[in-house]
Amino acid sequence: MSMVHASSGLIAPPSPNLKSEVSIVCGMARATLLSEIDWDAFEANYDLIREKIEAVFPKLFADFNARIRVPGGFHLYNGPQNREWRTASGRANFLVCSGVAEDPDVGDLAALQLATIRSHDQYNTTIYGLDDRYRGVFGGRMVVFMNKDDMASRQIESETLVELESVTDGGDVRRTVSGFKVRPYNIPKGSIAAYYPETNNLLPLSYHDKKSKTPSAKSIPVIVKPMAS
């Protein structure tokens, strides 16, 4: 929708020691980055962060600090939304990828490709509730979505409690999560999905894109098997 507006917490923090996301990021930066950036100043005054954003995108975020204080915020111009394509042809151009089968073969025919996902009541890693109306899940997040054919080949029935084990490490570390209920879902055969951060433990630190170093959280080879009763 391209709307930019200020936001603030609606309920009292559960602890006076609770840190904001900005505070956490600035603390990590202070501890790990050797730079002259004044992280303390950014943590204490968010206006300084908005000034830096305006400096990087002067046309889109002109007078950012003034506009953000207007009730309702402001609309961020979005060219494609207005069918404006800044290309040589004046039309939308598509890039064709060579393929999506870029991950190395793990050699286990039983492995399924896990994609970690968010629920409807979730913003990044902040979870606001236990419902996901997008997928018809209510009252809990310990769910794994599977294709019916994959369930049948593994003799797994709906609502079965299963364990997921990552097969990407190739070492002695056994990465598992358990206690997930299987939910039949219209997902491509060979693929499964589950919420994060509940399944973060399945992703080895070494398993990431070679160029960007982005964790391969959408393609984690795992074995799914029923939990022992």
Image (cartoon, grey):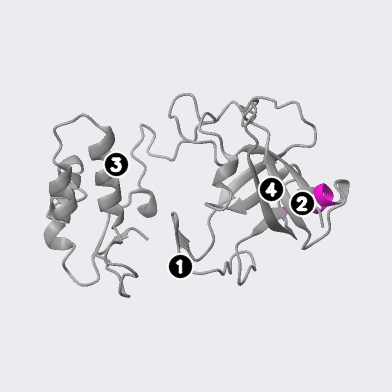
The answer to whether mark 2 and mark 4 are in CB contact below 8 A is: yes
Q: Secondary structure at mark 1?
A: loop
What is the magenta range?
146-151
The percent coordinates of residue 201 (x first, y second) are 57, 44
Q: Identify the disc placed on residue 147.
A: 2
**Closer to the observer: label 1 or label 2?**
1
Residue under pointer 3: 28
Amino acid of disc 3: Met
Q: Is residue 147 magenta?
A: yes
Magenta stretch, overall SS: helix
Which is more N-terminal, label 4 or label 1? 1
Asked whether the residues under the numbered discs 3 and 2 touch, taking CB atoms below 8 Å apart as contact, a structural biologist would say no
Residue 192's disc is 4
- Secondary structure of residue under mark 3: helix
Please provide percent x and percent y for residue 93: 46, 36
Task: Tell which of 203 and 61 is nearer to you.
Answer: 203
Which is nearer the N-term, disc 1 or disc 2?
Answer: 1
Which residue carries the number 1 mark?
A: 128
Specify whether 33 is left or right of 132: left
Q: CB of mark 1 within 8 Å of CB of mark 2?
A: no
Magenta stretch encompasses residue 100: no
- Going 30% across and 50% down the picture, which residue do you hit? 24
